[in-house]
Image: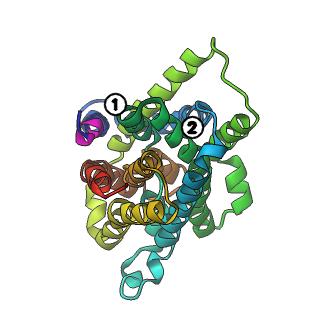
Amino acid sequence: MTYAQLLVPDFALLLLGWVICRYTFLDRTVWAQVEVLVYYFLFPVLLFQSVLRSPLDFDTALHLIAAGVLLGLAAIGMAYLLPRVPGLGRHLDRRDHAAAAQVAFRFNSFIALAVAERMAGPQGLQLIAVLIGFCVPMFNVAAVFPMARASGVHLGSALIRNPLIIGTGTGLAANLLGLQMPGWLEPTVSRVGSTSIALGLMAAGAGLQFGSLATGKALAVSVLSIKHLLLPLVAWLLARLLRLDPAQATMLLTFSALPTATNAYVLAVRMGYNGGYVAALVTLSTLLGMASLPFALSLPRG
């Protein structure tokens, strides 16, 4: 199976949500309630499980952790600084930027786990789990920050109450404490996680408004270029500077080129921003991932 084929199911679910919302009685009234369910319950459970699933091995992955954190900080920095780029800032809507900045650095953890397992088996899963455990909390905080600031919401309050941050933070704490999911609970939690992916993608498809991209072309090109072109190059440079072994370098490059998180749309909507615009970016990012994954993995990593 090719990397592009791994992304086909996600794109198909986005398209299915769009078709159902526009051509059946299951219109926006229904999908608005689905978004609430996904945001406050299903996605937090998925993130908690993803972070808790594999023990974090600090001794063998210290350089990988450093590379992942530095890669994340570079992505966040580039996304935040877009309004200050000469000649670009005046073409960006500040509220759209606050909502869309997250597209440049967040990632689809479901695809991350699927690709890692297919490429490197248990070792790949463990390495990608390390990156998930350290980067998801950081990325969720960074995603909420510009939207809370632009809306005049108290940042601390927004972070404490954000269900995605609660899910990842508690998962990381449980992982560091050595806690494990009880065997009798694992199947139920896994089913909840699978449901969140499908419903989250379909909700994003239901909210698609490609027309909104017409007035935000510069922002769309900028955040997607960071996500799918610049980040793989930064990851390649970090892998060389930190002397990652081939397996770690492969996982870092994979991590850098993943499509953006599907719950970016849900977060933008629940915080009162242009969800249709962000949903369109999620769709484009899923398509671009079919090219950026092979591109990143074609870079030398010996």
Q: Position of residue 263 (x, y in %)?
A: 47, 45
Label 1: few (<14), some or many (≥20) within 10 Å?
some
Q: Amino acid at mark 1?
A: Leu
Q: Is residue 163 visible?
A: no
Determine whether 12 is above or below 160 in the image: above
Residue 69 makes an appearance in the image: yes
Residue found at x 40% / y 84%: 90
Position of the N terminus by quadrant = top left
The disc labelled 2 sits on which kind of residue?
A: Leu
Dot 2 corresponds to which residue?
A: 47
Quarter of the figure with residue 201: top left
Residue under the image location 58 percent in, 60 percent down: 142
Residue 26 got which mark? 1
Residue 149 lies, with reference to residue 254, above or below; the image says below
Q: From mark 1 to mark 2, how far is it between C-alphas?
A: 28 Å
In this view, which residue lies farthest toward the bottom? 86
- Relative to 237, say whether 118 is above or below: above
Relative to residue 107, is residue 158 drawn left or right? right
Dot 2: element:
helix
The answer to the question of whether label 1 and label 2 lie on touching residues, with beta carbons closer than 8 A, is: no
The span picked out in magenta is 3-7
Closer to the camera in the image, 202 or 284: 284
